[in-house]
Amino acid sequence: SAVIFAGTPAMTNTEEYNGSGFSTGGDLNTGRGYVAGCGTQTAALGFGGYTTAPNTQGQALTEEYNGSSWTVGGTLNTSRYGAAGAGTQTAGLAWGGRATPIYNVTEEYDGSTWTSGGNYPKVVSSHGGTGLQTAALSVGGLNPGAPPGYSDSFEYDGTSWANPASIGRQGFGMKVLGTQTSAVATGGGSIGGPE
């Protein structure tokens, strides 16, 4: 089972996957693009994003999904879009993202409130993420001012980011599946220009 939600331009749509097909789920309260997320189909978390494009500020909005409807959760401390997410609805993780400027901040969610975590080693947006709040993986991302993107990954242990490793190519916008120690990165862009 899986769930996908939001999208540009400022979509509220949610769709649920049952292993063979998609069906419509409950709409987000606020339509947004470039939203980060984590969790499961019946306990998902969506945060950040933007409501109009072009947008230089981003949003701090967080919404929680119970398998049928979305409710408002605690707001991010840093408004942004293009962040990455990992973890669960009650132990979420957000890092990087952009507004003006691009950020390296990390925030941890406890089911109601976001608090600061260890900063990412670089400013980054449009990167891929997977794992848990205490064992997350970040892959690639947009490298501001030096396209086409980063070619490295970092691991988060619940306190700090470390163990940089090459992913074999520069890229941004990749989707990452799995855990910190067993993951797959797919897709993404490898040229400069807009996200």
Image (cartoon, grey):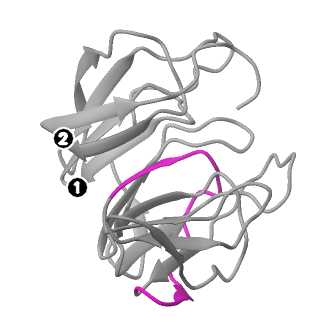
Position of 64 relative to 52 (above/below): below
Q: Which residue in the protein does label 2 denote?
A: 180
Dot 1 lies on which element? Answer: strand
Task: Note whether 154 is above or below 179 in the view shown.
Answer: above
Residue at (31, 75) in percent of width and height: 110
Q: Is residue 21 above or below residue 193?
A: below
Local secondary structure at mark 2? loop
Counting from the top left corner in percent of width and height, residue 107 is at 41, 56
Give the vertical position of 70 relative to 190 (above or below). Answer: below
Distance, label 2 to label 1, CA atoms, is 8 Å
Q: Write the start and end of the magenta stretch as one range.
A: 67-86
Name the residue located 51 percent from the left edge and 68 percent from the top edge.
46
Instruction: Determine whether label 2 and label 1 are within 8 Å by CB.
Output: yes
99, 54: nearer the viewer: 54
**97 to the left or right of 40:** right
N-terminal-most mark, 2 or 1: 1
> Is 141 or 15 nearer to us in this picture?
15
- Say if residue 194 shows up in the picture: yes
State the quadrant of the C terminus: top right
Question: Total of numbered circles in the picture?
Answer: 2
Q: Work out which residue is located at the far front of the displayed protein and give it.
A: 20
